[in-house]
Amino acid sequence: MLIQFHMIAVFLWAIFLITAINELKYRSSKCFVIVSFLFMLIVLGIGTKIMLMFPSIAKSGIWLHVKLSFDIIVMIVNIYLLVFSFKGKTLTEKKAGILYWSVVCMFVLMYVLTLFRPF
C-alpha cells in the first residue's frame, strides 16, 4: 500500500512541477512551485520509509542508484525553481523548454526503472 502511495505522489509531483515550469514561462507564480515542493518532500519521506522497511531493495541492483540519481536531479530542479519563483523572475522560452523536456524525460525514466528494473 505504501508503494502505491509513493507512485501516486511521484505522479502528482511530476504534474505540479511540469505545470510550474509552464507557469513560470509567462508569469512569476509561486503556487505550483510550492505544491510541487511539498509533493517532493512527501515522495522523499515515503521513499525513505520504504527503503527502511525493505532494506533488500537497496541491494536489488544498479537500477535503484540510477533512479535515485534522476530523483536527486529533479529535486535540485525543483529547489532551483522554488528559489527562482520567490525572486519574482520568469523563465525564458528556451530555458522553460529545456527544463520541461528534461523533467518529463527524467520522470518517465524513473517510472520505467521502477516498474521494469531493467538492470
Image (cartoon, rainbow, N blue to C red):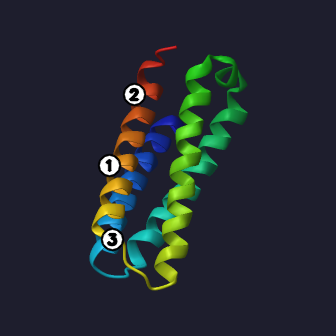
Q: Position of residue 116 (x, y in %)?
A: 42, 19
Q: Earlier in the sequence, mark 1 or mark 2?
A: 1
Mark 1 or mark 3, whichever is nearer to me: 3
Q: Residue at x 44, y 47 (%)?
A: 10
Dot 3, crowdedness within 10 Å: few (<14), some or many (≥20)? few
Chain-order first, disc 3 or disc 2: 3
- On the image, the x and y values in percent for residue 36 come to 45, 63
Structural distance between the alpha carbons of marks 3 and 2: 30 Å
Query: Which residue has dot 1 on it?
Result: 101
| Furthest residue toward bottom | 88
SS assignment at label 2: helix
Above or below, comparing residue 24 to residue 102 in the picture: below
Q: As displayed, is residue 113 above or below residue 101?
A: above
SS class, disc 1: helix
Q: Which residue is mark 2?
A: 112
In x, y percent, where is residue 58? 68, 25
Tell me if residue 48 comes above or below residue 83 in the rendering. Answer: above
Q: Amino acid at mark 2?
A: Val
- Amino acid under disc 1: Trp
- For image coordinates 31% across by 81% down, the residue present is 27
Q: Nearer the viewer, mark 1 or mark 2?
A: 1
**Residue drawn at (40%, 60%) of the image:** 17
In the image, what residue type sits under mark 3? Thr
Q: Nearer the viewer, mark 3 or mark 2?
A: 3
